[in-house]
Structures are given as structure tokens and as C-alpha cells.
Amino acid sequence: MSYTPSIQQQLREDGKRRASRRSTAIALLSTLVVGAVLTIIVINAQGFSAVQESFFNAHYAKKAFPRIFDGILLNLRVLLIAEVCVLILGLAIAVARTTTSPVLYPLRLIATLYTDIFRGAPLLLVLLLVGLGIPGLRLSYIPNTAVFLGTVALVLTYSAYVAEVIRAGIEGVNPTQRQAARALGLSQSQTLQHVVLPQALRNVTPPLLNDLVSLQKDSGLISVLGAVDAIRAAGIETAQSFNFTPYVVAGGLFILLTIPLTRYTDWLIRRQDRAQKAQGLF
Amino acid sequence: MSSLLEIKGLRKAFGSNLVLDNINLDFPAGSATVIIGASGSGKSTLMRCINLLEELSDGQIFLDGRDISEYGINLDSVRGEIGSVFQAFNLFPHMTVLNNITLAPRLVGRKSREESESHAHYLLKRFGLSDKADAYPAHLSGGQQQRVAIIRAIATNPKILLLDEVTSALDPLLIAEVLSLIAELKADGITMVISTHEMGFAQQIADRVVFLDKGLVREAGAPQQFFGNPQSEELKKFLGALRSAGRL
């Protein structure tokens, strides 16, 4: 026997359909109005044609693209290596800060000082100090290239942020989980490894990825040390043509670079929201 | 019967708040002791002192003749011999039922994965949870979660099993399935200490009932004597309140 919804249910569904059509129409209209207003303001601005000429010039965009593209590949390499190092170092620091054994006190002290310093110091300053200071030490076994030292500075700064996020995750795991594990006879480190960390990392994945997106775009700052990344390449092109279009091209490429991870983060957050609602927990 | 667990002069205070005062109890091997008392009477604290999740303020606890309250003892090895189940379902949410059960045997008991898994499958089958081996805790009912928690606690073959208000968060139908599992374990001869608000269950399973009131053991005895002919005023009042609430 097939099921036919009652008249009341059909009326409800008709109403819902009408409401949803109306919402779509309103959203479309309001977007068009806002878009039109913005366009009119920008086009009627006095300097519009001059700005269009010097920032959105197709000729210069095409000419500068190959060099900037080579640059963005360097950014890509730097950020991939930096991301892996940041995750490892950040995890190590976070775990070090949550230990309780008296033997490890110096480790906790170092980890705390480390996060205090590198969370507070501006990235640009760290880049300059590492990039210009370490070569001054004349350590023959450390490569003195701008790319290497720039990556080191990025890792130093972002590890501090990531460590704090992971630590928040560790402390956010319900204490009864730790107790249940200890009551089963698991040691401190077994509890951390098998019970606490897996839950902590899962809970903080979205904010972690957020920091990694931030790291991706900040990889452009290594240009201040002279590494020829996308920003530096755009600067070189601009210096030749006195046209700023290359910077816009570089900006566009950076946005493209970060979009996959941004979208993935959004998707992950939505999925976690759904899972928690489904469980009705927390 | 020789006593498996012996508590001598146990005292526990949180700051100036005295929660347990001079507790002296013997738990014979194979016996089931039920601890009853109002909320805040110290039942949970007593349980947590036994498995050393709380530091004692004074007194001694002997497990199988060994002083487990001695300073500097290896807590992990002691806890491995005591199975504990709490009121809230403390299953690990990121692990399947099977992994929840085999974690301690593998890490603490140093059993191989095959050995601990086949034992886990045997226990799950025995208690009607075979089809849940690969499920995550979030997909189980409260009663199933609590049964898994009990199976997890006995998977290490502990000398004694502590059950702290394991049915408090469950509805009556689910309570029944958890209680029947506990009754089966009792028939196996596992030594148990149970705190509960289920008086019917207490009468049915207990070899001895202990009444905790304001941190003191007011009365202890066999269920018939305990419920039928209470001696102390406090216990009479407590049982009277339960009766008028329809809980006894």
C-alpha cells in the first residue's frame, strides 16, 4: 500500500516550497542591488581609469605571469615542508607542556618560554632576526640561503601557535576519560598516546587547519630575506614596468593556494557539527 | 572465607570536609558487597579510594594481603588488578567496542592482539553483544554502553570488580539488562563491590549490605537482617524514606 500524505501535510509542504522560492528570489535581488551599487561607486570614482590601468592591466599580467608562477611554486615547497615541521614541533611542545613529572621540569620551562616568546614576537621580526642573525654565526653546517632560513623562521613562529591549539585540545578532553584509562591500569604516557591525544587532535583539527591556512599565506613573507617567491617576483616585474598588476596576480595566486585548505576546513567543521548533533553529546 | 580486600581505618578529607571517617571493612573472596547510602554519603569516594584514584588521608587498604596504600607503590600495576566501572559511561569514544575492551589487556597485560581479541569476542558473545564488536560507543544504547564498560573492566581478569552506580543513568528496561550481566558475574564467583540505588537488586545479589551515612559505616549485615530488621535510627529513616518514595 502506497502512502499518500494528508491534505494538511501537502499544504505544509506547499507553504515550505513557496517560502524557499521567496527566500531565493530575495537573496538574488539583494545581491544584484549590492553588486550594482558597488560597481557604480567604483566606476564613477575619479581615479578609476588610472587604477584600472596600473593594477588590472592584462598585458602586464600576461608578461609577469611565468616568473610569478615560478615564485608561487617556491612558496608551495616552503609551506609544505613548513607545515609538516610545524605539526611535529607543535605537537612535541604541547605534550611537553602537559607533562607533570619533576624530571621533565626543564623541558616544561623551555616549552613555556618558547611559546611565550614566539607567540608574542612579530613574524616579520623573527624572519629578520633569523635570516640576518644566523648567517652571522658562521655555522658552516647550516645552509645560509634565504629560503632555508625563512622556512626556519616560519616554523619557529607557527609551532608556538599550533602548540597552544593542541594543548587546548589536550586539556579539553574530559577528565573522566583520563581516569577511565588510569583505572584500567594504563600508564600516564599510554593514556596520553591511546586515549587523550587521538581525541584532542580530532577536536582541534579545524582551528589547526586555520593556522595552517595562515601559514600558507605568510610563506610570502620570506621575500623580505630576498628569496624569489611570488611576492618578490611580482616586485621585480613591477620595478621593470612601473605597473602594479604583478602584485595583483601574485595576490590571486596566493588566494588560489589557500582555497583548497580553507574549503576543507569548512567542510570538516560542518561535518563535526553534524556528528555532535547526531550524538546529542557535549 | 579469607578476605580478598581489607580496609583499615580509612579516612578521606577534602580540605576541611571529612568525607570518609574511620572505615573498617573486610571483603571476602567471591563475595558481593553492596554499599548503599544517600547521595554525598561517600560511596563514590570510597570506590575511588579503593582503586587509588583518590589519595587516602589516613588508613590502609590491603588487596590479597598486599598493602596497596603504601607510599610509592606502582599504581598502574595495582589498578590492573582492580576492575572499575563508573556511573557515566567512560568508554573511549574514538575506539570501537573491540578496541575499548582489548586496550588494557594489550597495553597493561602485555597480551597479543589475537589473544586479547579472541577473549573479547568470547565475552561479547557470552553477554549478547557479538554484533557490536565493531560499533563505536556513540551508536550503542546506554545499557549496551554500560555492559561494554563492565566487559572492558573484567577483560583484564581483575581480582576484584568495583561497580559505582552503574545503572543510575539508565531507564528501567536498560537497568534490567545491566543487572542480569552483573548477576552472571556474581555466579562466576568474581568478588564485587557495588554501590547502587537499586534496592531490589541489592537484596537479590548482596552477600552483605553496608549502609554509609555522613562518611561512617552505620550498619552492615546480610540483606535479610539489614532490610528486615534495621538497628540504627539512621538506617530506619533511610529505608523509610525509600519506602515512601516507592523505591523499596
Image: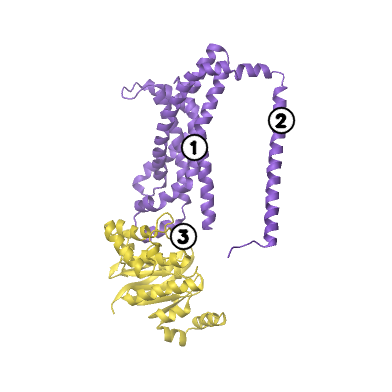
Chain colours: A purple, B yellow
Q: Is residue A121 above or below residue B92?
A: above
Specify the amino acid type for callout 1: Leu
For the residue labelled by badge 3, is the local secondary structure a helix, a strand or a loop? helix
* Residue B65 as seen in the image, left or right of residue B34: left
Instruction: Note whether B178 is above or below A132 in the view shown.
Output: below
Q: Quadrant of residue A56?
A: top right
Specify the subunit that label 2 lies on.
Answer: A
Instruction: Determine the residue positioned at 40% across, 32% down.
Output: A81
User: From the viewer's perspective, is A214 left or right of A186?
Assistant: right
Query: Where is mark 3, residue-wise?
Result: B139
Disc 3 chain ID: B
Circle 1 is placed at which residue position? A261
A76 and A18: which is toward the camera = A18
If the image is split into quadrants, where does the N terminus of chain B sit?
A: bottom left
Q: Position of residue A109 (x, y in %)?
A: 41, 41
In this rendering, does residue B120 appear at all? yes
**Quadrant location of residue A84?**
top left
Tell me the tag on residue A36: 2
* Alpha carbons under labels 2 and 1: distance apart: 31 Å
Q: Who is closer to the viewer here, B36 or B198?
A: B198
Q: Is residue A185 visible?
A: no
User: x%, y% of residue A224?
Assistant: 48, 21
Q: Quadrant for residue B155, please give it.
A: bottom left
